[in-house]
Image (tube, rainbow, N blue to C red):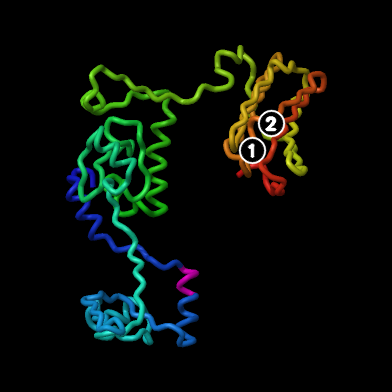
Amino acid sequence: WEPQTPSQRLSFCGGAPPKATINKLMWEALQDCLRDNRLELFQSCAVSEVLWNGSEWSISLTSTLGDERNRRRMFEEEDTPVVPAKVEADFIWLATGCADDCSSEKLLRTVQEKFPTRLVNGYPVLDDSLLAWPGLPLYLVGSLTMLSIGPAASLHPGWIQAAQKISTHLLGESFPIAGHVEQARLKEEVNLTVQRPKSLVEEDELGGRTKHEVEKYSWTDEEFLVTIRIYVNEPLQKDDVKVRFKKQGLELWALTRDNAYHLSVPLLYKPILEERCRLKVNEAKGRINLVLHKYDNHEWRFLKG
């Protein structure tokens, strides 16, 4: 895969077996209709001609499997109807999907105009190691990464591979955006750097304290409020407790004389109204309450999403 040119990769992907278009649940429903003679299904055939005769459609079909023996071996169904030469129909519904093409996406069309990269049949040639648009911190996932990921780009294994590539790179301290930003008709030199969001408490602020990840806590859900209760079991000052509420996550640091307690919930069960959330601290008992304000009064079955 690596030594091949983008055109060779596209040709290889075109020769890969097509993915299924009907999931298992829908297929079982179709089988019920077939058994009740409410539906007739013709598999592995192509439409060679469609004519309108004034009152109905005449559709000419051709088999794409070859002889009958190959057809039955592939589907393992002895009662699958043979593809007829013609089918008459009153209505035709087309469910053909759509072709992937950067030029049909408004955002990517604008990006291509300002930071052009090579396109092969509408697929962009990306940085294989990052899945980034050359010269930009713009990452792609899905079918448009086919020239980098392969035929599985739009399937679950391809999403996993793409996520691994992107997350591995983003989790680095910082990285310069290589490529041709300076060549994109910019009049002055540009140096772009993407950095991780600043932590609530930096390592140098711990001052030798022992770090503990908070794993034991309790929480309750009542109408519009979810309350998380954390016990550090030693005195602390409210000014030494820092919390960051996000739309669907939170992070907490609590510093005592000798210890640093950290709680991170990157994904809550549901979004919260961060501006209405509150922090309550009982300094003497070492107790912290995080009061989350929900969007609605629907019950939270879990704390984490």
Q: Secondary structure at mark 1?
A: loop
- Say if residue 69 shows up in the picture: no
Q: Is residue 26 magenta?
A: yes
Question: Can the viewer see residue 123 in this picture?
Answer: yes
Residue at image point 71% right, 31% down: 290
Is the Cβ of the residue at disc 1 closer than 8 Å to that at disc 2?
Answer: yes
Q: Nearer the viewer, residue 271 or 302?
A: 271
Gap between marks 1 and 2 measured at Cα: 8 Å
Quadrant in the rendering for residue 212: top right
Please give the residue where the numbered disc 2 appears in the rendered image: 277
In this rendering, the answer to whether 202 lies above or below 162 is above
Q: Amino acid at mark 1?
A: Ile
Q: Which residues are magenta?
A: 24-28
Element on which disc 2 rests:
loop
Classify the position of the C terminus by image quarter: top right
Residue placed at 31% from the left, 41% from the top? 108
Label of residue 272 in the image = 1
Name the spot of residue 121 as percent of width and height, x first: 21, 51
Question: Which label's residue is closer to the chain start, 1 or 2?
Answer: 1
Residue type marked 2: Cys
Q: Position of residue 6 (x, y in %)?
A: 20, 46
Horizontal side, residue 171 vs residue 227: left or right: left
The crowding category of the residue bearing disc 1, from other C-alpha atoms within 10 Å (few below 14, some 14 to 19, many at least 20), is: many
